[in-house]
Amino acid sequence: MEIRIDRERCLGAGMCALTAPEVFDQDTEGGRVLLLDTDPPPARSLAIRRAAYACPSGAITVTEPRPASGEPAELRGHHIRASETFDCQ
Amino acid sequence: MQHEPSTNSPEQAAQEAVVLPIQRPEGCPFDPPAELAELRERQPLTRLRYPDGHLGWLATGHSTVRAIAADTRFSSRYELMHYPFPGTEDLEIPPATVGDLTGMDQPEHTRYRRLLAGKFTVRRMRALTARVEQITAEHLDAMERQGPTVDLVRAFAHPVPALMICELLGVPEVRRADFMERAAAISAPESTLDEQIAALAGLGDFFRDLISDKRAHPTDDVLSDLTTSELTDEELAGIAGFLLAAGLDTTANMIGLGTFALLSHPEQAAALRADPGLADQAVEELLRYLTITPTGVRAALEDVEVDGQLIRIGESVTISIQAANRDPARFDDPDTLDIHRKATGHLAFGHGIHQCLGQQLARVEMRVALPALFTRFPTLRLAVPPEEVPLRTDMNIYGVHRLPVTWGEE
């Protein structure tokens, strides 16, 4: 899984640090996102996708193969559909 | 695939337009107006007739509301908006006052937000947990001495977040009673508009005084920190007022209404008592289920296509957060309060650049206050029939004006 953060878009809401604290933190100055782990284990993937989904400013992008096709899919912030991160329709 | 957004004639749009449903169903203080669910099912983005005659939009679906809130082509500037609430038709809405982040767009908003966000991080707010626990315990002690029948809003739900705001802003102990009195007067149901305006002005003086103190003798708090930034005294006073307005009534009403909801769903209260480890998700679920900020408004800064429909420049869009948080497409069995559910992704704090600045503080306060209350008073119950609890149906932030509770032997 590839994770990119955009500190220019980040507004320090903290949803990433709340949702996936092993992978994201906030700096003390402006509360903006810090990437703690650039190569997290697959077990963290769901939490990371949820963090990207929850980010209100779309500052987190994750790229990973889709389970069905193996094709890489880029998921950015608010363009992620809930169905890709939660058990729902 | 290219496709044209559907447009319809003004006559057609006018014919289709609805007015914003605001009446909650009789006897269901926690539920949104029933018509919202029908609209969401039929058309999650629909034409809305505003009281001033404006023909705008209403979004009710979770993904639609989320997309609009995240889209900076929709403005949050008050002066660009039409308001969907009855009685606002002749209101001349002025722009946001200095320091009121809610009514600003980028880049003005970004500048303030960046100066503030570092003071409200997950880490900094969690570090306050022990202090919130202490304040909570003190108020529960006082409640016990005062009881066994008290108004929970006055005894607990309001003072706990109010004291936390005092500490964050660095209001010294000797001035807290004065501060709380002024703050309470602004939103008191019995205050007249003139009294509210006077209280607001008094609070402005209070903050200007406090800021000059902090400049002279900085202490360890947000306001003192901010005096070293580029912000002027006027901006600082505005921001202090904004933080108070955003952080007090909101959390106070979540604790008050949250308690009412748990008392009305005893099996949920029992689950929380049995396993305080559920506190985190119980808080998220209560935020979703109660959505005390039910409605937001935006104004289109350009033509924007949403859900295949064309929202034109200048049109107002009302986002029904309460409808979005009860969308069955997003939450299974959405009208059921279930603290075992993972409610992450709810929109109670909003979405996009205006998502609540103080949400991590609110989480810490609720996570501490609610389990502590229910554990301390295992027999806690309403002291009046539920239909006699006065609801804040007339306020921007929903909740209860008072919550008479009792405990002990029946």
Image (cartoon, coloured by chain):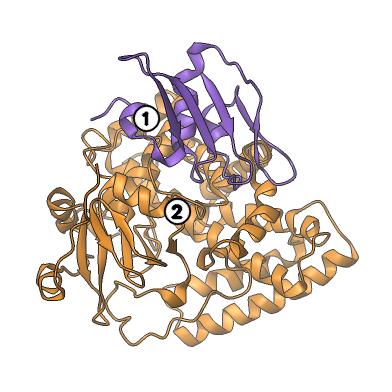
The reply, left or right, for residue B27 in relation to residue B179 is left
Q: In terms of image quadrants, where is residue B282?
A: top left
Q: In terms of depth relative to the viewer, which is nearer, B405 or B298? A: B298
| Residue B327 drawn at (x, y percent) | 24, 43
Q: Which mark is residue B342?
A: 1
Residue B169 vs B14, above or below: the answer is: above
Residue B404 vs B334, above or below: the answer is: below
Residue B261 vs A19, above or below: the answer is: below
- Quadrant of image for the C terminus of chain B: top left
**Could you tell me how many numbered marks the image carries?**
2
Q: In terms of depth relative to the viewer, which is nearer, B82 or B247? A: B82
| Residue B277 drawn at (x, y percent) | 47, 24
How many C-alpha atoms fall within 10 Å of the one at disc 2: few (<14), some, or many (≥20)?
many
Q: Residue at x 45, y 84 (%)?
A: B193
Residue B115 vs B97, above or below: the answer is: above
Chain coloured purple here:
A
Task: Say which of marks 2 and 1 sits in front.
Answer: 1
**Please, what is the three-letter code of the amino acid marked with disc 2?**
Leu
Q: In terms of depth relative to the viewer, which is nearer, A11 or B122? A: A11
Residue underneath mark 2: B152
How many C-alpha atoms fall within 10 Å of the one at disc 1: few (<14), some, or many (≥20)?
some
- The span from disc 2 to disc 1 (Cα, nearest Å) is 28 Å
Pointer 2 indicates a residue of which chain? B
Q: Which residue is drawn at 22% across and 42% down?
A: B335
Judged from the image, the secondary structure of the residue bearing numbered disc 2 is: helix
First of labels 2, 1 by sequence position: 2
Chain coloured orange here:
B
Judged from the image, the secondary structure of the residue bearing numbered disc 1 is: loop
Pointer 1 indicates a residue of which chain? B
Q: Can residue B148 be seen in this view?
A: no
- Quadrant of image for the N terminus of chain B: top left
| Residue B186 drawn at (x, y percent) | 52, 74
